[in-house]
Image: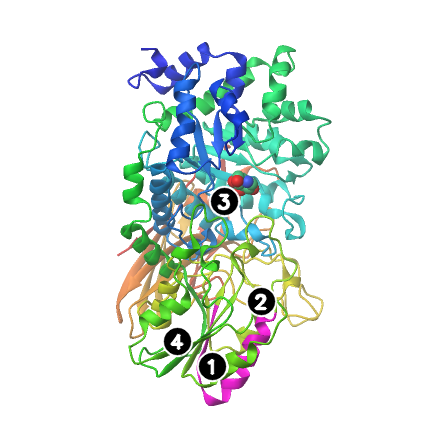
Amino acid sequence: MEPYRDPSKPVEERVSDLLRRMTLEEKIGQLCQYSGFTEEIEEAVKKGLVGSLLNVTGVENVNRVQELAVKGSRLGIPLLMGLDVIHGYKTIFPIPLAMASSWEPEVVRRAAEVAAREAAAEGIRWTFAPMVDIARDPRWGRIAEGFGEDPYLSSVMAWAAVKGFQGESFSPHPERVAACAKHYVAYGAAEGGRDYNTVDISERTLREVYMPPFKAAVAAGVATVMSAFNDLNGVPASGNEYTLKTVLKGEWGFRGFVVSDWNAIGELIVHGIAADGAEAAKLAISAGVDMDMVSDLYRRHLPDLVRSGVVPVEVIDEAVRRVLTVKFQLGLFENPYADPERAREIVKCREHLDIALEIARKCIVLLKNEGALPLRKDLKRVAVIGPLADDRDAPLGCWRALGDPNDAVTVLEGVKKKVSPATEVLYAKGCDVSSEDRSGFAEAVEVAERSDAVVLVVGEPAYMSGEAASRAYLDLPGVQEELVKAVWDAVKDAGIPVVEVVMSGRPLTIAWSAEHAPAILAAWHLGVRAGDALADVLFGDYNPGGKLPVTWPRTVGQVPIYYNHKRTGRPPAPDRFTSKYIDEDWRPLFPFGHGLSYTRFEYSNLRLEPERLEPGETLAVSLTVTNAGSREGDEVVQLYVRDLVASVTRPVKELKGFKRLTLKPGESRRVVFEVPSELLAFYDRAMRLTVEAGEYEVMVGSSSQDIRLRGGFRVTRTERFIASGRVSFTRALVL
Ligand code: NOJ
């Protein structure tokens, strides 16, 4: 047996052995990825000129193509089959922004684990997830795909997602897939929130806000990273030697491979930094982009660039090594094929669908409740109204892989299953999501008037967020707000409770509702079990405990708006000449970390230890949380820190720890956060990663604006760190 085929040999040895046997064309082939499957691609696969395919699905198709590579090509190198398995493969979970609202990393890990199990069973061994782009701008549609605005929350979730997809350690396992942290880097900072747009941010913001989740994914062992479309401070991310080589592969020691985003190498020409395909290929490979997603420029130009000495063959070898290493780590050489039997057994099995329900419940955020919720199950009549009330498509959200809308449970169905048999459930659509037609309002009003409670389901359809779905307005699309007003006007005097359920892939500007509707739920796009999860919350079988991972603005004019902003020299105050608007409140509609419950939580007895922190020490922040209401419920305890005086301006507060816990009525628990001192580090004036000596304020609360306890500590000495891939998290204990 050739050494590269011998699974008992170390991966490095297998890679070296294989590399020695490859022609230049075969090597470059490993760096090429194509979409779908055509006759031309088939020929290329047989010649060993393709390393990976994306968007080839179905066990039979995948196995057939794989066989061409394994049996039909000279060296029999298996293909890496990729797909965007973002929040589920066929069992669709809530969109990532919704999962971040759970503030429970285990939710993200579990969803990724199930998605990996299903995808791998059907031969997909690589997912282009997690998307870990920080987003401070809800106009940007891709905010739906990530974990929100906060670098710490996103880093914890990025770690969890990688572990879920790849397993605790990345080693051959038939139920695991290689993950891909994307879009490296700062893609979410697109000017004006317009997708693919230019990014121009400071090095400090880049490193403190946009890079941390990527660094966390790398520390978690992510197998691949995707280079983004955007240009960053003048250099496109897919030709950026600094971000890819200096930081990712250098400082952080990333050992996997980098794949470009779709045709991002070709777009280097459009960006205007390459004159032609050859130059684009040269720039990308030299910058550290190992695999070319679909531009075909590596295949067309790298052979000549190497032969003419422009690109050293060592650069190619290095990239091929990285790609082959991932293939060996996945066990593809030993097990290249999917097992149709197993796929039939596990894909969309009962267990997975139940996990989808459990997860969906945890992602719902109760934005407002003046006592309308929970509803009673024995009402005489309940009206379910709105364009998304009986819609199967919206719950699946953007990027639903092979999800099927027919599997989704609508809110109307969920409510019908939930109420007592004597309860009549009335339905009226009212209007379409985004048309101007108001002809359905009369029916909606009539149905509402005849009911004892109204559930209004409004918001965005699935594809109003995700890629290329930037919006200039953040209102409920079409005439939906008018529908809400019409229904509310008709029933308000009768005291009929109205509950607004907002489905969306982003924060929406629903200031009118926030003022008038007695209760509002942020439902995001909750996946296949959306209707069941929402019915559980509406009727009190589940007490909502989600919190916003992103700020909800009052109006689009406030964007970008995020909780961890700087203080400015003139913080907002009644005086005119302070930082605010003359025509709108400067504060958000719903702040980061906000989310209510059907019970109440009290915070007490904050203790900080030690009060003088030495470099390398751990700060223990402990407090008591009590469920002071009469129902069991979940609270997310949030820990924020502020550096009071520093060499550079620091945010008004930064999340440094959080813990979701369940408390019975009357129950009290002690929560302890163990914060490693390096979590206080930031980039100083000389861009050195530093924890500065001085006073710090600690804030603990139920949201970034609902701070319940405050304390302080002192860092005794300044501590500097050398650049590395080290990532630390706060440990949260519940005693
Ligand atoms: C383009 C998107 O930006 C990226 O997120 C996705 O993974 C690729 N297309 C592949 O579908």
Give, as a three-letter code, the residue at label 2: Leu
Q: Are marks 2 and 4 in contact (CB under 8 Å)?
A: no
- Whole-Å distance between the Cαs marked 2 and 3? 26 Å
Which element type, helix, strand or loop, lies under badge 4? loop
Which element type, helix, strand or loop, lies under badge 1? helix
User: Does 372 sit above or below residue 623?
Assistant: below
Give, as a three-letter code, the residue at label 1: Val
Determine the residue positioned at 63% across, 40% down.
230
Determine the residue positioned at 61% across, 62% down.
474
- Whole-Å distance between the Cαs marked 1 and 4? 20 Å
Where does the N terminus fall, quadrant-wise?
Answer: top left
Q: Earlier in the sequence, mark 3 or mark 1?
A: 3
- Whole-Å distance between the Cαs marked 1 and 2? 22 Å
Label 2, residues with CA under 10 Å away: few <14, some 14-19, many ≥20: many
Q: Earlier in the sequence, mark 2 or mark 4?
A: 4
Q: Which residues are magenta?
A: 479-501
Give, as a three-letter code, the residue at label 3: Val
